[in-house]
Amino acid sequence: MTKIVEAKAHPPEPALSPEEDTILSLIERVASDPTIDLDRVEKFLDMHAKIKEEASRKAFNAAMAKCQKEMPQIIKDAYNEHTQSNYATLTKIDEMTGDFINDNGFAPQFSQCEACMENHYALKCLLTHVDGYEREYRLELPIDNAGPTGKPNKSLTHGASSAMTYVERKLTCLIFKIATKDNDGNQGPVDTITQEQADNLRDLIESTGANEKRFLNYAKCRTLEDIPAASYDNAVAALNSAQKKRQGSA
């Protein structure tokens, strides 16, 4: 029995940029013309590589500045009984900042590295950018296996795991300048708006022709439902004010 296999069309190869096309043409000339000065070609390629690296470095720094400016403050969502204080979990930080990091072209890659000090945990982050530049960050902190009095309160494995999560949280916040907040001291996370208020804001955004993503950047929240209850009136006023400005300029 003959098996018929459906042929799948392969996507077209991406077109070369003018810069890549120039370099490829130069390489083809070198391969076909033995009279070309290879030393000059090598110097040209070195210079081109340096210019390209500098351009990608500037793009990285510009994207980082934009990303840090857009970052929302993270409301602390967990309570530490030993320190009797609230803190933002790694899950919450990832949830609230992931879109901002990705939208600005960054891809963080975390991995354990060798610690310089005994009983410490070290983590490095290779942060790559869509334009080709990358930068490495590193943080080292003690393994957490003792309570506030200094007495061991967890196993070495548990302590290492706790340190791993803590270091990743701290390193992420340091790289992107993420701030955490607790609006009410140690009383727990702040109340957010109701679903009805979120729906009202969504209707107001649509009726005023506003951009929801830009509005959320302004409010420093990931979703409308994350807006603090105390900020609801200000959010409505901001949308109404923006609508009046657009009508006045029309």
Image (cartoon, rainbow, N blue to C red):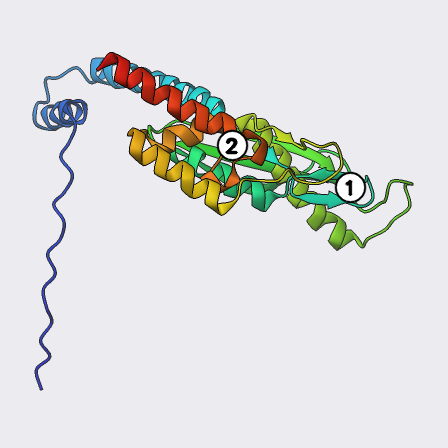
Determine which quarter of the picture holds residue 15.
Answer: top left
**Callout 2 secondary element:** helix
Residue that numbered label 1 is attached to: 119
- Horizontal side of residue 241 vs 207, given as left or right: right
Callout 1–callout 2 Cβ contact below 8 Å = no
> Could you say which quadrant of the image residue 137 lies in?
top right
Q: Please state the horizontal and vertical placement of residue 126, each as a whole percent of the image.
A: 49, 34
Q: Which of marks 1 and 2 is in front?
A: 2
- At horizontal 47% and vertical 40% (from top left) the residue drawn is 197
Residue 48 visible in the current orientation: no
Residue at 43%, 19% (x, y): give it.
Answer: 61
The image shows residue 125, relative to residue 47, as above or below, that is below
Type of amino acid at the residue the image marks with label 1? Asn
Name the secondary structure under disc 1: loop
Q: Would residue 193 be seen by someone viewing this image from the given angle?
A: yes
Q: Residue at x 44, y 34 (%)?
A: 101
Q: Is residue 210 or residue 94 the one in the foreground?
A: 210
Task: Name the spot of residue 152 as percent of width and height, x first.
Answer: 87, 48
Q: Which mark is residue 232?
A: 2
Which amino acid is tagged 2?
A: Tyr
Q: Earlier in the sequence, mark 1 or mark 2?
A: 1
Please name whichever residue, 21 or 88, is drawn nearer the observer in this view of the structure: 88
User: Which of 115 and 200 lies nearest the eye of the viewer?
Assistant: 200
The 10 Å Cα crowd at callout 2, few under 14, some 14 to 19, many 20 or more, is some
Q: Quadrant of the N terminus?
A: bottom left
